[in-house]
């Protein structure tokens, strides 16, 4: 058996057993193993790791552990300058697009409401979601540790909260997206782009009285869903205003 000493820092402790949290502990394995395999065998998805130090030196996921090493594993730190230290997290994406697992339908709707490209289908299985994430370079959002451990997944985020509004705050904070919010530019139904539409061209499709009270309308260019600034619009604006002040549990 090979034995190493390893410690996980900050929120990575959420993934490991309580008796190992916040301290260095011994870990044994057969023969040699990549540091990525060891980290994930202890419960931490590779998508949550930003920096690995082996005996004080930064290391990639592919480095082999033979036994006797001391390993420190860190998440991303927004306010810590690591200088030239090599991190394992891939370069930030130029465009933030998402794919969500089947348990995050409300979060998908909120992201679309704020103008973010968010693919969601409740019939997708894990293989579908992982393939879409890898093929399209989409950030995979999930509450499933195992899904984030799939080798083809490069960009991912584990969602901790059970409340959709707090889940939204998690995503906006993790990827620093507050300045990129473009409300009411995407269809909450299908994720398509919304375009202004002339009232007269869609008046026959409007519910009773809507044409009397509203003059501005948008239509999804993919599914044709119509939108107008009704009472739901005010509720959504309130959510957008409030989410920045919510505490993440």
Image (spheres, rainbow, N blue to C red):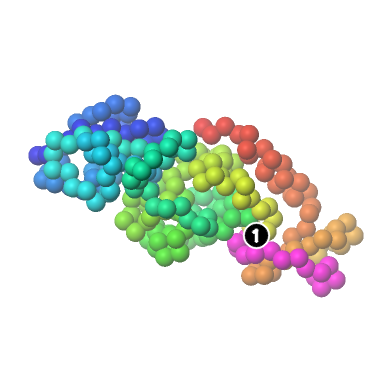
Label 1 CA crowd tier, 10 Å (few <14, some 14–19, many 20+): many
Q: Residue furthest front?
A: 84
Residue 167, located in which quarter of the rendered image? top right
Question: Horizontal and vertical percent for residue 247?
Answer: 57, 32
Q: Residue furthest bottom?
A: 201
Question: Horizontal and vertical percent for residue 159?
Answer: 47, 43
Q: In the visual, does 29 lie left or right of 15?
A: left
Which element is circle 1 on? loop
Task: Tell me if I can see residue 17 in this picture.
Answer: yes
Question: Horizontal and vertical percent for residue 148?
Answer: 37, 50
The one of 132 and 206 positioned closer to us in this rendering: 132
Picture residue at 11% right of the left edge, 45% below the top: 31
Q: In the visual, does 20 lie left or right of 232?
A: left
Residue 163, located in which quarter of the rendered image? top right
- Chain part drawn in magenta: 189-202
The one of 228 and 123 positioned closer to us in this rendering: 228
Question: Horizontal and vertical percent for residue 141?
Answer: 47, 50
Picture residue at 57% right of the left edge, 59% below the top: 117
Picture residue at 28% right of the left edge, 29% below the top: 20
From what the image shows, is residue 123 above or below residue 168?
Answer: below
Q: Residue furthest right?
A: 212
Task: Tell me if I can see residue 146 in this picture.
Answer: no
Give the residue number, with chain letter if any, for mark 1.
186
Residue 231 magenta-highlighted: no
Say which quadrant the N terminus sits in. top left
Residue 215, located in which quarter of the rendered image? bottom right
């Amino acid at each position: 058996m090979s034995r190493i000493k390893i410690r996980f820092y900050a929120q990575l402790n959420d993934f490991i057993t309580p008796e190992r949290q916040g301290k260095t502990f011994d870990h044994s394995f057969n023969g040699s193993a990549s540091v990525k395999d060891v980290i994930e065998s202890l419960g931490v998805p590779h998508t949550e790791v930003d920096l690995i130090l082996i005996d004080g030196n930064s290391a990639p996921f592919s480095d082999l552990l033979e036994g006797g090493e001391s390993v420190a594993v860190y998440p991303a730190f927004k306010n810590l300058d690591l200088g030239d230290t090599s991190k394992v997290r891939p370069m930030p994406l130029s465009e933030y697009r998402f794919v969500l697992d089947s348990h995050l339908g409300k979060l998908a709707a909120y992201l679309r409401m704020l103008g973010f490209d968010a693919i969601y289908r409740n019939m997708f299985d894990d293989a579908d979601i992982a393939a879409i994430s890898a093929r399209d370079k989409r950030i995979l959002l999930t509450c499933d540790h195992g899904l984030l451990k799939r080798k083809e997944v490069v960009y991912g985020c584990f969602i901790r909260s059970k409340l959709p509004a707090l889940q939204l705050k998690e995503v906006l904070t993790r990827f620093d997206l507050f300045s990129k919010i473009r409300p009411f530019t995407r269809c909450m139904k299908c994720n398509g782009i919304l375009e202004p539409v002339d009232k007269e061209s869609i008046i026959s499709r409007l519910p009773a009285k809507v044409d009397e009270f509203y003059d501005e309308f948008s239509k999804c260019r993919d599914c044709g869903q119509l939108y107008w600034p009704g009472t739901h619009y005010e509720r959504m604006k309130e959510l957008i205003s409030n989410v920045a002040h919510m505490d993440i549990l």
